[in-house]
């Protein structure tokens, strides 16, 4: 009886060690593939969004740098020379040296709130620069930088 018991027990242990199904069912494989696909698509969407945010940030940084450079050039002149007709920084006219400099359809336009052509230049002179451009998706964007210049 003992030997028969051992024989029965060894057959039972063999069945547990080697189940009848040696692989995955088609249903289990499809579920695993679906889960993997959702994870990959989620990661891809995140990567695309991240790339777009990086491009937007780079464009905004470039526009800010161009605004600062233009403002520094304007501030090198005395207030009486800045807004006059014929100057490179004429009111409401794009600054030629910054047209399409770094961004698509980029334009920097100075305005001088409180200044009226033909009247003396006010002291202090308010200067506002506006940069407009089309971003990488073709959407119009703009930024402003303001400063006050005194004599």
Image: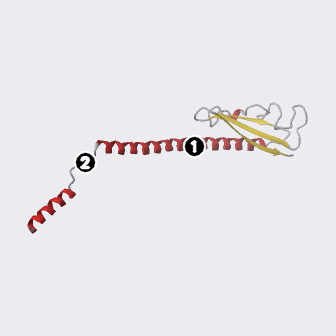
Tally the numbered discs.
2
Q: Residue at x 86, y 39 (%)?
A: 80
Horizontally, is 110 left or right of 49 in the view? Answer: right
Q: Among all residues in the image, which is located at the extreme bottom?
A: 2
Q: Residue at x 91, y 34 (%)?
A: 119
Horizontally, is 38 left or right of 61 in the view? Answer: left
Q: Residue at x 88, y 43 (%)?
A: 123
> Residue 63 appears at what percent x and percent y?
66, 41
Horizontally, is 47 left or right of 34 in the view? Answer: right
User: In terms of depth relative to the viewer, which is nearer, 53 or 107?
Assistant: 53
Secondary structure state at the residue bearing disc 2? loop
Dot 2 crowding, Cα within 10 Å, few <14, some 14–19, many 20+: few
User: In terms of depth relative to the viewer, which is nearer, 58 or 69?
Assistant: 58
Q: Which residue is mark 2?
A: 23
Secondary structure state at the residue bearing disc 1? helix
Q: Residue at x 76, y 31 (%)?
A: 93
> Residue 113 appears at what percent x and percent y?
83, 37
> Residue 145 appears at what percent x and percent y?
74, 42
Q: Among all residues in the image, which is located at the extreme front?
A: 1
Q: Which residue is mark 1?
A: 53
Q: CA distance from mark 1 to mark 2?
A: 45 Å
Q: Verify CB contact (< 8 Å) between mark 1 and mark 2.
A: no
Question: Which is nearer the N-term, disc 1 or disc 2?
Answer: 2
Marks 1, 2: nearer the viewer: 2
Dot 1 crowding, Cα within 10 Å, few <14, some 14–19, many 20+: few
> Residue 110 appears at what percent x and percent y?
77, 36
């Amino acid at each position: 009886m003992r030997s028969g018991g051992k024989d029965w027990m060894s057959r039972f242990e063999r069945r547990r060690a080697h189940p009848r199904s040696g692989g995955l069912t088609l249903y289990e494989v499809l579920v695993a593939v679906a889960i993997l696909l959702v994870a990959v698509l989620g990661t891809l969407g995140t990567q695309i969004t991240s790339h777009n945010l990086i491009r937007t940030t780079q464009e905004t940084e470039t526009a800010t740098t161009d605004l600062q450079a233009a403002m520094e050039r304007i501030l090198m002149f005395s207030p009486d020379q800045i807004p006059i007709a014929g100057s490179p920084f004429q009111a409401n006219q794009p600054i030629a040296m910054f047209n399409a400099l770094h961004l698509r359809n980029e334009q920097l336009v100075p305005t001088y709130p409180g200044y009226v052509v033909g009247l003396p230049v006010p002291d202090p002179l308010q200067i506002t620069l506006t940069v407009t451009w089309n971003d990488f998706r073709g959407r119009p964007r703009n930024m402003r930088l303001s400063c006050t210049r005194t004599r």
